[in-house]
Structures are given as C-alpha cells and as structure tokens.
C-alpha cells in the first residue's frame, strides 16, 4: 500500500520540473504527520491505509537518499539521535503513533542505517571467507537469514495475526511469559513458513 501511494504521488508531481524530488519528499512527510494527527479521530480504515500514510515518510526518505546521497555528517547525526529516540520517542506504525515526530523519525532512520551497515559488514566478511569448510558452516546461518529477509512481509503479517488472535492470548502468551517474548517471533516465522507452502499464497507474497 505504501508503494502504491508513493507511485501515485510521483504521478501527481510528474509535471513539477524544478525541485520535484524535494516536493515529493516534503509532501510525503506532511502526509505522514497528518495521518499521525488525525488517526485517533478516524475509525479503522481498510487495507491499512492510515498505516501506509504514516510509513510513507520512511519510504520517501529511502527513495530520496537513493537519488541524492547525503553527506556523511547527516548519517552520523541520525545515528547519534537514535539512542535518544529509543529513550524518549516512539514509532508504532500499526497504531499510527510517532511520539515527538522529528526525534522519532530521525532516530528511526539512524537505526535503520546502523542495521544496513552491520548487514553490509557481515556480507563483506562472509564474501572474504575462502575456506570451503567455513562456507559450508556459515551457510546454516546465511540461508535462514536470507529466507527471513525475502519473506519479511508474510512474517510481519503472521506476527500481527498471532498478536491479535485468541490463539495468542490463550496459548502463545503463556509460552511467551514462561520462555520469553522472542517466542512470538519464532511462531510468526513458523506460521509464515507454513502459509508459503500453499502455492497461491506464495505467489501473493512474492
């Protein structure tokens, strides 16, 4: 849904020649802020439309940075803001909540960039490994991580399902209390693996 809204915004702004990218980014952030403000006063809309508008700013900033790479100090500043955003901010796309919007938004971008750097470094380390034995051993780690990355959408959908279903509160919640909250993620991955065995659903989540 986020992608469709963003493509629609690009189509609307197609006639803008000067500062087109900046206009699209600004409108995306404005729509995201507006959705955070008005969501408490609106009933739940279908297809997660409000959630898509809330997340639109993150999609737009990623697209803009791809077109116009930022100076190093911008990335560094966002990383420095990240711990403050963790402590004082809040980002919850599901409930369209973003406490202290600028702080949470910049901090979330910094955290995403840190994860990107870690993944890039890990990929570089693995690519530099020449021993076949070590490659065989690391494949047990690489394959599951790659699978989770490819199918992050169905995992997220199953995580939402198990959080908001009676099954979660009657069974999974007791397991989480007994063994830790990470069991919710494990069960979401298991559910995703099961539904991806169904041919039609696998095509939907490609």
Image (cartoon, rainbow, N blue to C red):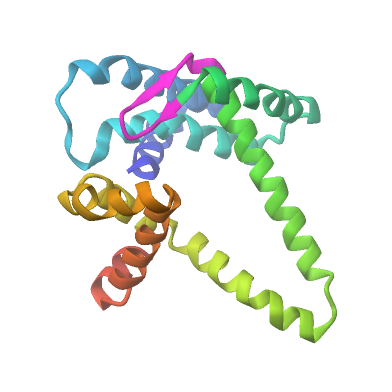
Looking at the image, which residue sits at the far front?
Answer: 178
Q: Quadrant of residue 92?
A: top left
Can you see residue 50?
yes
Left or right of 32? Residue 137 is right
Classify 11 as above or below 200. Answer: above
Classify 157 as above or below 129. Answer: above
Q: Where's the C terminus, which quadrant? A: bottom left
Left or right of 100? Residue 168 is left
Q: Is residue 99 magenta?
A: yes
- In the rendered image, residue 37, in percent from the top left (x then y), is placed at 32, 14
Can you see residue 19?
no
Left or right of 72? Residue 48 is left
Near-viewer residue (174 or 123): 174
Magenta residues, start to end: 91-103
Left or right of 105? Residue 156 is left
In the image, what residue occupies the spot 41% across and 33% down?
A: 55
- In the rendered image, residue 160, in percent from the top left (x then y), is placed at 29, 47
Q: Quadrant of residue 41?
A: top left
- In the rendered image, residue 49, in percent from the top left (x then y), is placed at 26, 35
Classify 109 as above or below 133. Answer: above
Looking at the image, which residue sits at the far bottom?
Answer: 132
Classify 181 as above or below 189. Answer: above
Near-viewer residue (133 or 64): 133
Q: Quadrant of residue 31?
A: top left
Near-viewer residue (10 or 147): 147
Q: Where's the N terminus, which quadrant? A: top left
In the image, what residue occupies the spot 62% across and 20% down?
A: 84
- In the rendered image, residue 197, in percent from the top left (x then y), is placed at 31, 77
In the image, what residue occupies the spot 37% across and 40% down?
A: 2
């Amino acid at each position: 849904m986020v992608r469709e809204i963003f493509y629609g915004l690009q189509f609307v702004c197609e006639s803008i020649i000067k500062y087109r990218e900046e206009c699209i980014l600004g409108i995306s952030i404005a729509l995201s802020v507006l959705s955070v403000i008005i969501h408490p006063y609106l009933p739940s809309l279908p297809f997660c439309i409000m959630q898509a508008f809330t997340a639109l700013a993150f999609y737009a900033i990623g697209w803009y940075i791809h077109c116009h790479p930022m100076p190093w100090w911008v990335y560094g500043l966002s990383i420095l803001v990240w711990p403050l955003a963790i402590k004082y901010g809040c980002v919850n796309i599901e409930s369209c909540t973003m406490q202290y919007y600028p702080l949470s938004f910049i901090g979330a971008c910094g955290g995403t960039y840190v994860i990107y750097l870690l993944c890039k470094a890990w990929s570089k380390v693995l690519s530099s490994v020449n021993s076949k034995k070590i490659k065989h051993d690391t494949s047990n780690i690489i394959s599951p991580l790659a699978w989770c990355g490819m199918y992050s959408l169905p995992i997220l959908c199953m995580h939402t399902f198990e959080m908001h279903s009676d099954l979660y509160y009657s069974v999974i919640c007791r397991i989480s209390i007994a063994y830790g909250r990470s069991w919710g993620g494990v069960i979401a991955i298991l559910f995703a693996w099961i539904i991806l065995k169904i041919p039609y659903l696998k095509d939907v989540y490609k």
